[in-house]
Image (spheres, helix red, strand yellow):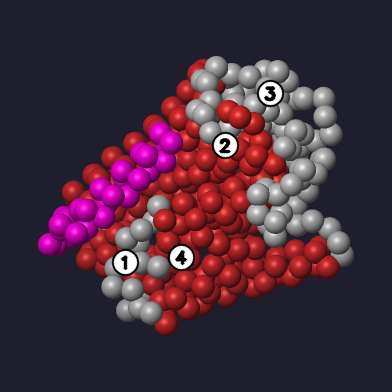
Amino acid sequence: MPVEEVSSASQVLIPAVAAASMVTIGYLANRLASGKPLLEYRPRVSVPWPLTAVLLLQVLTLVNVISALVNMGRATELPSNETFIMSVWSGAFTMSGVAIATYFLLNILAGANSSDLGLPSSTRELFADVGLGIVAFFACILPVSLLDGLLHLLVPSETKHPFIEQMLQGDSPGMFAAIAIAATIPAPLFEETAFRLVLQGWLEKWEDRLTGFTATLRRHEPMRPEGILELDSLSSASADIAAVEVNASPQRRLVTWLPHGWLPIIVSATIFGLAHLGHGWAPVSLIPLGLVLGYLYQRTHRIVPCMTLHAVFNAFSMIRLWLIISEP
C-alpha cells in the first residue's frame, strides 16, 4: 500500500471508530440515566459441567502462558519469518481443536445442551448476537485503547506482544495473514470458551450455591451446601428448568458491596488479563475488556456476542498495527 494511502487510512479509520465509540457510550449512558439496564437479563439454569472441566482448561492455558514466557526468556533473537508463521498456524489449529473438542465433551460427558453451551437457538438469534457483539466493541474500544495508551505513555514497557516484535523485524503478507487469522478466529474461540463459557459459567453456579440462590437450579439438583467444596460428578443433572422464580434475589451476597453475578465476572476477567502475561501492558489493559465480555455473558448467557466482540477487537488491533508499521 502506498504511503499516502496508509496515512489517509490511519487518519480516517481511527477517528471514525473513536467517534462511533463515543456515540455508543453516550447512548448507553442515556439508558442508565433513564433507569434502564445496559442489557436485559436472560434467565438461565446452572451449567452441568464439573470443576474438573474448568481446571483442565485453565491448566492448559497456564501451561501455554508459562511456556511462552520461558521461550521469551531463553530466546536470544527472534525466529525466522518462516518458523514464526509455522508456529502461529500450529497454535491456531491447536486452540481451535481444543475449543471445538470442549463443546463436544461437555455435551457427551456432562450432558450440556445447546442452551448450556451458549449457542444461538436460531439464525435470527445468531445475527442478533453478532450485532450485540459489534455494539459492545464500540462501547469499550475507546476506554480500553485510552487506558492502554496511557499506561505505555506513563510507564513504557520493555516487552511487546510477540506478534508486534516479529512484524517489526520484517513483516510480509503471509505473516500478517497468519497472525490476523489466528488473532480473529482461534484466539476468541478458545479464550471465550475457556474464560467465559466454562470458567464464568461454573463460577456462577458456585456463587449461586453459596448464596442460596435457587432460581438457577436444575430439577433434581440438590443444594448440598455441605458438598460445595467437593468436585462435581461428571454425570449430568436434568436440563429442565426448576419451577422457581428465575428473577428472584439471592438470600445474601458473597461480597456485600458487589451485586450478585459480578464476582464471577471479575474473576474471569482477571484471569483473562493474566493469560496475556509477557505482552507488555496487555494484562492490565485487557482486564476492562474482560469485564465487558463477562458482563455480556452474564446478561445473555450466550457465547456468540462475546466471541464477536473479541474477534472485532482483535481485528481492529491488527488493522491498526498494520497501519502503524506501514507508515514511514
Whole-Å distance between the Cαs marked 1 and 3?
49 Å
Residue 284 badge: 4
Query: What quarter of the picture does the C terminus occupy?
Result: bottom left
Which residue carries the number 1 mark? 160
Direction from residue 238 to residue 248 in the image, left or right = right
Q: Position of residue 261 (x, y in %)?
A: 67, 48
Whole-Å distance between the Cαs marked 4 and 1?
14 Å
**Residue 265 falls inside the magenta stretch:** no
Which of discs 3 and 4 lies nearer the camera? The answer is 3
- Disc 2 marks which amino acid? Trp
* Front residue of 124 and 240: 240
- Tag 2 and tag 4, C-beta contact below 8 Å: no
Instruction: Report crowding for label 4: few under 14, some 14 to 19, many 20 or more residues within 10 A (C-alpha).
Output: some
If you read the primary sequence from the N terminus, does the residue marked by circle 3 or circle 4 appear first? Answer: 3
Image quadrant where residue 217 sits: top right
Query: What quarter of the picture does the N terminus occupy?
Result: bottom left
- Tag 1 and tag 3, C-beta contact below 8 Å: no
Which residue carries the number 2 mark? 202
- Tag 3 and tag 4, C-beta contact below 8 Å: no
Instruction: Report crowding for label 3: few under 14, some 14 to 19, many 20 or more residues within 10 A (C-alpha).
Output: few
Which secondary structure type mostly characterizes the magenta part of the structure? helix
Direction from residue 228 to residue 32 in the image, left or right = right
Whole-Å distance between the Cαs marked 2 and 4?
24 Å
The part of the chain drawn in magenta is: 55-81
- Disc 4 marks which amino acid? Val
**Residue 67 falls inside the magenta stretch:** yes
Residue 222 badge: 3
If you read the primary sequence from the N terminus, does the residue marked by circle 4 or circle 1 appear first? Answer: 1
* Front residue of 58 and 72: 58
